[in-house]
Structures are given as C-alpha cells and as structure tokens.
Image (cartoon, grey):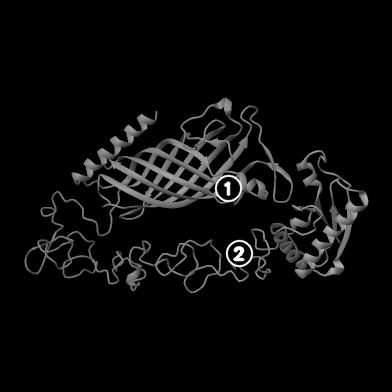
Amino acid sequence: MIIKMRSLVFVFIAAGMLSLMSAVEVKAQSQTIGVSGGYVNLSGGNRPKFTLQPTFGGTLGQRISDSWFADFNLSVQTLYDDSTVNSSLSLGRNKSNSTRKWSALRLALSLNRYLLSPDNGFNISTGFGGGLMVWKMTDPVSDTVFLVTSQKNQTVDYSASELFLTLQSGLHLIFSSRWSLALQAHADYLTGAGAEFNNAIESARNKWQLGSFLSLKFGFGGPKQMSWQPIRQTASVSSGTTSISSSGKNDSDNDGIPDDKDKCPYNEIGVPVDEHGCPLDGDYDGVPDALDHCPNTDRNAKGLVDIYGCPVDADFDGIPDYMDQCPHNVVGAMVDSVGCPIDSDKDGVPDGLDDCPNTLYGVQVDKNGCIDLTIIDKPLVLYIDYTAGSSEVDPDNREKLKKLAAILNFAKDVKIEVNGYTDDIGTPLANRQLSEKRASRVAQYLISYGLDAARIKVFGQGEGNFVGDNQTAAGRAKNRRIEIVFYK
C-alpha cells in the first residue's frame, strides 16, 4: 500500500512538472465541485496511538481572484487506536488491539493561494482556515460513548462539536477548463472551543488531526476573468474589439501603449498603467493601484499584504506582521509597541487574557492566570528524606513550602495544621518528640516565607497512622512524613 501511494505521488508530480514545462495555460472555472478520499490520523495525545486510516468526502470551491480560491470540505472518518504501534504514521490498524474509536464529521473552510502562475497546468497552493469537528469517542466493541468529567466536575459524554484551525498545502494538476486533480495535506488543531472537559482530560486527549486527500474536481460557472491576466486570443484583430493607438498600431487593452511595445497587453480597459503598459503599483506590494485599498503601504510590507493590498495582522493585535516581532500571539492578548505580549505579573498568561493580572510573582496559576487553590483542597503530604534523628528539610521540599506560603498569603482565611510522623524504630516517646521537632521545623520555614505564625498549629504524632510497611526501608520512608491539613 505504501509503495502504491509513493508511486501515485511520483506520477502526479511528474505529470505536473511536464505540464509546467510545456507552459500549458488553462482558464479555470469560477466554481468547482468534487469528491475526495485519503488518510487521516489523530496525534498529540496519550498512548495507545491512532494510525493513518481512510476518510471520504466532498469539496466545493470558489475562485476569488487570479491567485486566491476558497475551499469548503466535508468528510467523515472512523479511526481506531492500536496498542501495538509506536508511530501515528503507521498505515491501517489491528481492530482487535483497539481501545478507543473516534467517529467524526469534519466541516472545513479554507482560503488558499496559488504560488505559481494561475494559468499553469500544474500549480502549488498553500492556505489556512478553520471549521467544525463534530466527534465522539466510543468503546470499539460496544460502541457506547465514554463518560468523562467536565470543567464543572459533572459526568458528560466524551464528545463535542469543536472548532478547529487548519493549515493546508496542495499540488494541483489541471487537465482542462473543467477537470482537475488535487493532492492536498492538512493539519487541524482542535482549539477546545466547544469541548469543556476538565484539565486532566484536556492534557491527555489528541489535539491534532493530520491528513492528506486526493480530490477529483469538476469546474462550472464559466471561466473566471482575472484582472491583469493575459487572455489567450484566437481572433482578436479580426473581431473588431482591438483598438488602434494614436500611432496607428493595435492597442488591445486601449491603454495608449501599442501592443508591440506593451509588456502587459491584455489589461482591463481603464486601468492606469506605466510607460510599459503594466498596471501601476505605487507601493510595490504586488497589488495594482486600481485594486489597492492601501496604496501607500510601507515597502517593507511586500509579501505580507492581503488581496486588497493592506498589511496582514495575523494575530489581530494592531501591529502589522511586517513590524510584529511576535506575529503569532493568542488573539486577545495585550501587546507592546513591537507586538509582543505584555505579562505584568510574569505568570505566563498575557494581559488581556489574564483574569488575575496582579498575581504575586512566582505563585503557580491556572490557565486563566489566577492562583491555583486546588492545592489546598486536600492535605499536602511531604516525604522528607531525613537522616537519622535530623529535622532539617531538604531543598526540594523547602521550595514546595515557599510556594505554599505564597498561596496561603493570598488565601488569608485558611489556617493549617502541621503534623509530623515517624516510623516505629525507637521508643514511642522519642519518636513523638522527634516528629514534633520535625513539624516545628516545617512551620519555621513557612514563617520565614512570610506566613503568620498565628495561622499555624504544630503536632507531633509520633509512630502512628502508618501508611507504609515498617518491615521495609521503602515503607519506613513513607511513614517518615509531614502532613499539612488546611481548614478555615
């Protein structure tokens, strides 16, 4: 199967290159409709991995200008994971090794640009867009939908109607004005919009869908007449539509430049031209002045303007991409004068997206930039590697205490109990005294980090409430611990 696919790609590229070399010009139709088939997979999540599996669908296209076209794609797919494979690029799957089945309907709209001359018989395109993925994750045997926990700690179906962003590129072989073949690859990123699962599910699930598909397209709606695009003439002189310039020579586009001196002899009538007969482009951005909504664009923006000749601002932060040192920010983030995110409290969540923009420096925050108080929902256990008879806290646990103190200094209504525990080696009295000494040392560190001593109670529990087997070294290490209990 892989060899056949490689052969197909080779034949496709070779045919396209032959078409390019022969400079075939084909006038594309305004609209296209087609059928498509290919392979997709899911990637980015925990094992077991999903593998490349078939997908089928249809496509509608609309030519917008010389080089731009829009595509609407609809496809259906059913994917199984496979616990025996190491790579998501594996082809096919063994259904008996599957633990999950993904069923999805993909609706995608993309804006694409041809990179070569629009009338070539072979072309390359690149594009971007987005769409809706309607999916569910089910058991492959019973076909029942899995249940997971939502952000509100409710039990919900593992399914969603989720928005995604997509990038795609393609190779196009145009046989005639009606028929064409396209080999396209796409990468979809599932944004999470429409899928409100808890953090554990979000971090573990697959966020990328990668795929490629081959589409056979049929054009209709009549040839698209492109501005500034030469049109092959069969009888232009004899048809009576060709004007005569003041010099008595033919002037097909009536721009005052005779055809024999006109480097762009087929312009739309009435378009301002230069001395060579080509459309004026005062700011050299590739968009003729007659179509340019931003005719005085900075020349540094060349190649970074839209179809209307205006500078592109991909992340909508008010700083054009040609001036933006951080051009791919999350939409909504506040930025500085060079387009980079402002993060006043240095918590990793940019201002504008930060619900708590003045968080204490160094405190762990959630995805919304607010202090993560889930740490105090249950007792905090510290397994400290004490030497015999010692009460000193190791550096790793001191760092944990420092972060805990910062959180408690924010949640000022929370008080704590520090409980020390030992293993059963030694006398009960000595162990209780040692456990109290160790708990007191933890309390001293919290106080040194700014926590009010009045909010702390210290208890030495000694050799009680064992959590490990005292007959093994590992079990005794578990019993030598500090438990911090939170209450109000």
Residue 482 placed where, x, y %? 81, 54
The residue at which mark 1 appears reads as 162
Residue 179, numbered circle = none
Quick check: 328 above or below 465? below
Nearest to N terminus: mark 2 or mark 1:
1
Quick check: 266 above or below 23? below
Residue 484 placed where, x, y %? 82, 56
Of 404 and 123, which appears nearest the observer? 404
Residue drawn 38% across and 47% down? 169
The residue at which mark 2 appears reads as 353
Residue located farthest toward the right when viewing the structure as drawn: 429
Q: State whether residue 175 appears in this view.
A: no
Determine whether, in the image, residue 304 is placed left or right of residue 437: left
Disc 2 to disc 1, how far (Cα)? Answer: 21 Å
Q: Kindly identify the amino acid type of the residue bearing the numbered disc 1.
A: Glu
Residue 456 placed where, x, y %? 85, 64
Of 174 and 192, which appears nearest the observer? 192
Q: Kindly identify the amino acid type of the residue bearing the numbered disc 2.
A: Leu
User: Which is closer to the viewer, label 2 or label 1?
Assistant: 2
Determine whether, in the image, residue 135 is placed left or right of residue 411: left
Q: Quadrant of the C terminus?
A: bottom right
Residue 25 placed where, x, y %? 22, 47
Quick check: 38 above or below 406? above
Residue drawn 28% across and 55% down? 226
Q: State whether residue 205 appears in this view.
A: yes
Neighbour tally class for label 1: few under 14, some 14-19, many 20 plus, Cα within 10 Å:
some
Determine whether, in the image, residue 113 is placed left or right of residue 158: left
Residue drawn 30% across and 55% down? 66
